[in-house]
């Protein structure tokens, strides 16, 4: 673990040169180690970059502020998204990985800032796995995602993210040109083994081309 580059973070180098770089983005109350076991299950051998969110909500780390459940502080979201994009660029220089092969793996709050990154800095990510994501904001105009592969995995019984919200996010990403796969789990907001298996299989079948 290191605390420079403006984020407390973990970096683990790749042991498989063909694997993407996984950007792990935890949910509310998580930290830089929270999703490391998930990364190992999804893509063994991948390089891993896992930052801790810089915002605290009642002592719990997050990536951006919210006003209430599902109501985001859009000014803070924009600033924190820029910070994350800049962190990615600096980390690529520091750790010498291909910045064009970064695939975000985000859960809940982490998935939401990953979606914001797709909307505001589309070339920062070569793909994304978004667990329990919702629309962070509606960009105008939409970015050019140009076939960027994106997996959305949400729960049919999620009390936080309604089905319509998931479908709205999928629609926006598709309108922007993203290659979106939407899967539904018979679950609520928590991750399930089915999420992991389907995301693992999707990653194995998805060709990640360098964005650089």
Image: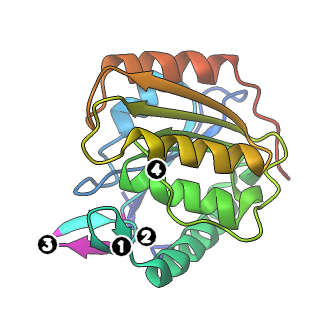
- Crowdedness near tag 2: few (<14), some (14–19) or many (≥20) residues, C-alpha within 10 Å: some
- What residue is shown with label 4? 111
Q: Can residue 101 be seen in this view?
A: no
Q: Mark 1 points at which residue?
A: 54
For the residue pair 107 and 34, the one nearer the viewer reads as 107
Separation of marks 4 and 1 at Cα, in angstroms: 15 Å
The residue drawn where x is 66% and y is 56% is 118
Label 4 vs label 1, nearer the camera: 4
Q: Quadrant of the N terminus?
A: bottom left
Which is more toward the observer, 68 or 106? 68
Graded by Cα atoms within 10 Å as few (under 14), some (14 to 19) or many (20 or more), the crowding at tag 4 reads: many
Q: Which residue is tagged 3?
A: 58
For the view shown, which residue lies furthest in the bottom direction? 75
At 56% from the left and 29% from the top, the residue drawn is 182
Q: Do the residues labelled 4 and 2 touch (CB within 8 Å)?
A: no
Q: Where is residue 42 in the image (x, y as percent from the top left)?
A: 48, 25
**Secondary element at tag 3:** loop
Q: Which mark is residue 7?
A: 2
């Amino acid at each position: 673990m290191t605390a420079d580059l403006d984020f407390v973070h973990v970096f683990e180098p790749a042991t498989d040169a063909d694997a993407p770089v996984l950007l792990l983005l935890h949910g509310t109350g998580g930290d830089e180690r929270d999703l490391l076991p998930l990364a190992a299950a999804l893509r063994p051998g991948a390089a891993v970059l896992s930052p801790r969110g810089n915002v605290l909500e009642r002592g719990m780390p997050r990536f951006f502020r919210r006003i209430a459940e599902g109501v985001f502080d859009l000014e803070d979201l924009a600033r924190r998204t820029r910070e994350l994009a800049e962190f990615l660029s600096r980390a690529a220089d520091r750790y010498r990985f291909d910045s064009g092969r970064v695939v975000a793996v985000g859960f809940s709050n982490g998935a939401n800032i990953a979606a914001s990154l797709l909307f505001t800095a589309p070339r920062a990510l070569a793909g994304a796995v978004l667990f329990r994501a919702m629309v962070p904001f509606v960009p105008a105009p939409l970015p050019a995602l140009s076939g960027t592969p994106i997996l959305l995995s949400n729960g049919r019984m999620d009390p936080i993210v309604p089905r319509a919200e998931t479908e709205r996010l999928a629609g926006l990403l598709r309108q922007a040109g993203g290659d979106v796969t939407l899967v539904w789990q018979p679950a609520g907001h928590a991750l399930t083994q089915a999420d992991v298996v389907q995301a693992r299989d999707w990653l194995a079948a998805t060709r990640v081309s360098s964005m650089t």
